[in-house]
């Protein structure tokens, strides 16, 4: 199968989803109101609450949710074959991720930009709110720890990427100040920023930065651990400064990289006419994880991911200029992430190997597929770029910069979100000094994932990535299910049809529960006495979620009768 034909087909389906399905959600389900005064205007403080142009905000939201996960998950899932991976990416993006991300954004905007954990208490109940905060805190700690490990490993393996990655920071700050102070549009400055970033790749290629001697001088065994400390020091500072200084411009620069990468994939597979050497349905070795349910857990970001509701209700809701922008930002970014997942499938299915025999060696078993996922994507994308005459060594650094940039922006946002969660928990506990102290909350948000990232174990991957990451997929999808339940309850209260939320909710809860049970059995058999109890706890939380969601829907169901609630004045509890 020519990869170019697959790419065009999937992109056409995504376009139909945005044009038709997101319009239905906007007009009939979420009922966006252009006159509604968003929290960005109501609470404008110049730091977190900042009315933002929808194109700039799209850049922030997309790159915050994209990260490395929509690259890694699909690159692993091709182990079962490219056809089931692409089917889940397409269906999941259009009918699940778009509904989830879009809905979480609108729901938060209608509740003073509260985080999804806090507003769950308002919409569903106190117990559900507590459940959400527990899951969110664990998930963010794990995500921030693992992304730091991934970035650290990539910087060690690709020293030519160090200068462009860190050089992007002053470029973004300069753009942020120029746009904010001059009240200028961000498009032209950010395009110049992208050009400068790619020029820095040539510099990085000529002057690679290897900090192994520094690590040895400090007595640090793992070189990546030095990078991890540097990354968390950077994200602590980044989480404290106004969003317009660094977060927005850096994310906008990186959003352009999606379009650059997509253009390279489409043009590269078109010029090279690469075919899918990976099988449509792969015959996996005995003892491999079952495609059902693990495909739907492995591909989370790129189909539907609970992490996205944290971004929608965390940073994005505080920057939405007009409520009607939520369709473009929320649903549009979900389409963007699905597109990145498509690029990953094509890179590892058609670019990384020339023959099926060569591909079989890269995907000999699930462990091999998982361990080589990032490298396979980088090498596959580099092959597509080389089809266009770009030197292969430059193309490899370019691909590494794409992956690191997306992962770093997600980590930026993740640490800021963790600070919000710490402050929300402090507010609920009545700890006013912690709730109001951004520096102290930021230090707590950094300290826990930093300690987890530096923990030894899990062979070379570290304890967070090598051991605990096995719980990410189920925890992440559990979070997405709970978010869909909260959105469904709110939709019912507004007397709209909740079917768009309930269908993916039921499917997601079914797959997550199934995976939790299978994992629990596997962990017990393997005598994994850390993972087994944690999996059991997550399973209990999943059952708790099902009960709370059912109770919330049952309580709200009588409110579905009567005229639709559309005007802001009718949402007194939301506009208060």
Image (cartoon, grey):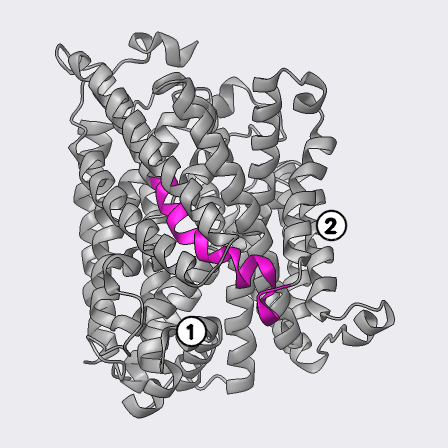
Q: Name the residue under label 1.
A: 367
Work out whether residue 185 can be spotted.
no
Position of residue 112 in the picture relative to residue 45 (left or right): left
The image quarter in which residue 299 lies: bottom left
Most frequent secondary structure within the magenta stretch:
helix
**Element assignment for label 1:** helix
Instruction: State left or right for residue 29 relative to residue 561.
Output: right
State if disc 2 and disc 1 touch (CB < 8 Å). no
Camera-near label (1 vs 2) is 1
Q: Earlier in the sequence, mark 1 or mark 2?
A: 2
Side of 468 where 10 appears, left or right: left
Q: What span is colored magenta in the figure?
A: 457-480
Residue 178, x across and y down, in percent: 64, 44
User: Is-magenta flag for residue 439?
Assistant: no
Mark 1 neighbour class, 10 Å CA radius: few under 14, some 14 to 19, many 20 or more = few
Reply yes or no: does residue 472 show up in magenta.
yes
Q: Considering only vertical position in the picture, is 535 above or below 551? A: below
Pick the residue in front: 362 or 44: 362
Residue lying at 41% horizontally and 44% vertically, measured from the top left: 536
Height in image: 275 above or below 290?
below
């Amino acid at each position: 199968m020519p990869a170019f034909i697959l790419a065009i087909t999937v992109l056409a389906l995504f376009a139909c989803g945005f044009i038709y399905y997101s319009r239905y959600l906007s007009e009939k389900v979420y009922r966006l109101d252009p006159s509604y005064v968003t929290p960005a205007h109501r609470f404008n403080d110049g730091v977190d609450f900042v009315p933002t142009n929808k194109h700039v905000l799209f850049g922030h939201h997309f790159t915050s949710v994209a990260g490395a996960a929509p690259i890694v998950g699909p690159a692993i899932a091709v182990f079962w074959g490219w056809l089931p991976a692409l089917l889940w990416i397409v269906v999941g993006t259009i009918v699940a991720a778009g509904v989830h991300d879009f809905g979480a954004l609108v729901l938060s905007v209608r509740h003073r930009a509260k985080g999804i954990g806090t507003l769950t208490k308002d919409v569903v109940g106190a117990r559900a709110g507590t459940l959400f905060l527990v899951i969110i805190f664990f998930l963010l700690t794990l995500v921030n720890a693992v992304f730091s490990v991934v970035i650290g490993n990539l910087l060690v393996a690709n020293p030519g990427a160090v200068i462009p990655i860190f050089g992007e920071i002053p470029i973004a700050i300069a753009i942020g100040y120029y746009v904010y102070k001059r009240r200028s549009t961000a498009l032209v400055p950010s395009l110049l920023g992208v050009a400068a970033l790619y020029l820095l790749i040539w510099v990085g290629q000529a002057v690679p930065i290897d900090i192994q001697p520094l690590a040895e001088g400090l007595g640090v065994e793992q070189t990546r651990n030095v990078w991890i400390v540097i990354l968390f020091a950077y994200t602590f500072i980044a989480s404290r400064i106004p969003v317009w200084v660094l977060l927005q411009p850096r994310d906008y620069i990186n959003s352009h990289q999606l379009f650059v990468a997509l253009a390279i994939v489409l043009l590269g597979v078109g010029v090279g006419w690469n075919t899918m050497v990976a099988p449509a349905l792969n015959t996996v070795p005995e003892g491999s994880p079952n495609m059902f349910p693990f495909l739907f857990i492995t591909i989370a970001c790129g189909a539907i991911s609970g992490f996205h509701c944290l971004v929608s209700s965390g940073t994005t809701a505080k920057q939405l200029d007009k409520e009607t922008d939520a369709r473009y930002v929320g649903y549009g970014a979900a389409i963007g992430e699905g597109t990145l997942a498509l690029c990953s499938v094509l890179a590892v299915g058609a670019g990384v190997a020339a023959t099926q025999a060569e591909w079989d060696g890269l995907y000999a078993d699930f462990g091999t597929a998982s361990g080589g996922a990032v490298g396979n994507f980088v090498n596959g994308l580099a092959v597509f770029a080389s089809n266009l005459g770009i030197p292969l060594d430059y193309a490899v650094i370019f691909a590494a910069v794409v992956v690191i940039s997306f992962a770093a922006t997600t980590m930026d946002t993740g640490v800021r979100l963790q600070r919000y969660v710490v402050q929300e928990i402090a507010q609920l506990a009545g700890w006013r000094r912690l709730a109001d102290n951004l520096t102290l909350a930021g230090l707590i948000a950094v300290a826990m994932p930093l300690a987890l990232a530096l923990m030894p174990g899990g062979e070379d991957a570290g304890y967070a990535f090598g051991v605990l990451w096995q719980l990410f997929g189920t925890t992440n999808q559990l979070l997405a299910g709970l978010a869909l339940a909260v959105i469904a309850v709110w939709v019912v209260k507004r007397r709209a049809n909740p079917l768009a939320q309930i269908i993916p909710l039921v499917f997601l809860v079914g797959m997550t529960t199934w995976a939790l049970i299978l994992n629990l059995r596997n962990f017990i058999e393997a005598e994994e006495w850390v993972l087994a109890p944690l999996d059991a706890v997550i399973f209990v939380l999943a059952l708790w979620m099902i009960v709370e969601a059912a109770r919330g829907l049952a309580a709200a169901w009588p409110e579905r009768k009567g005229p639709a609630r559309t005007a802001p004045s009718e949402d007194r509890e939301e506009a208060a």
